[in-house]
Image: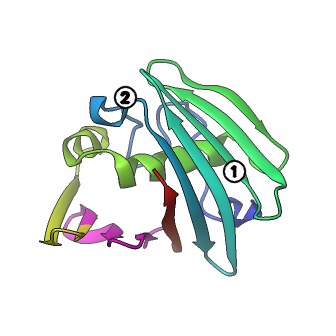
Amino acid sequence: MSLLISACSLIKNDQAVTDFYQLQPLPYALKNKTYLESLTFEQKDKRTLLTQIETQEHTLSLGAMTYSGLPIMQAKWESNKGLIGFSSAVFDESMVLRIIRDIQLIKWPDSDVSNGLLAGYQVTTTQKNSVEGVREITQLGETVISITYTKQKIVLSNITEQYQLTIEQVNE
């Protein structure tokens, strides 16, 4: 899971993960869901993991392992308490919060993402057709993060932190 470690540094606050976004409560539409996904992180090298995300009333639980079955991380984040459970020999707390930030930027509705953006940042989503769209986080007209949604996968490109995250659904 060192794949996600090499990105930028983060604020160690449970709610403020980076300079531009504060984690937001779990949206009603995403409660009681389970996602099993293949996650490929590319920066200087490329690594792939299997992740499972489970959501409940106010809680997001996240687990990650290698494709050979080696557990990498378990974490639990609660909307009103922040990170409440965390276990990893590879990640520190700030890295887990960054992963949760990226999950929110990808899965949370535009209005929730917008609520988490600090002054000077905007979110816009353009729907190309019924199965393809692009969400962009911008600052002063410059794209900071671009997320492309297609039927097969979701690709998050973080221009500022210089990495790409590709998510492919195993099931939902």
Q: Is residue 43 left or right of residue 115?
A: right
Could you say which quadrant of the image residue 14 lies in? top right
Residue 138 pos. (x, y %)? 25, 63
Instruction: Say whether disc 2 or disc 1 marks the residue closer to the N-terminus.
Output: 2
Q: Main secondary structure of the magenta part?
A: strand
**Residue 86 % position (x, y):** 71, 32
Q: Residues within 10 Å of mark 1 (few under 14, many from 20)?
A: many
Taking the spot 36% from the left edge, 49% from the top edge, the residue there is: 107
Q: Marks 2 and 1: which is nearer the front? A: 1
Q: Residue 25: which numbered mark, if any?
A: 2
Q: Secondary structure at mark 1?
A: strand
Q: Residue at x 29, y 29 (%)?
A: 28
The range drawn in magenta is 135-161
The quarter of the picture where residue 33 lies is: top left
Q: How is the image coloured?
A: rainbow
**Is 137 inside the magenta-drawn segment?**
yes
Mark 2 neighbour class, 10 Å CA radius: few under 14, some 14 to 19, many 20 or more: some
Q: Indicate whether 143 appears above or below 62.
A: below
Residue 20 visible in the displayed image: no
128 sits left or right of 11 in the view: left
In the displayed structure image, the side of residue 35 where residue 23 appears, left or right: left
Name which residue type carries label 2.
Pro
Q: Residue at x 69, y 81 (%)?
A: 45
Quarter of the image that includes the N terminus: bottom right
The residue singled out by tag 1 in the image is 64
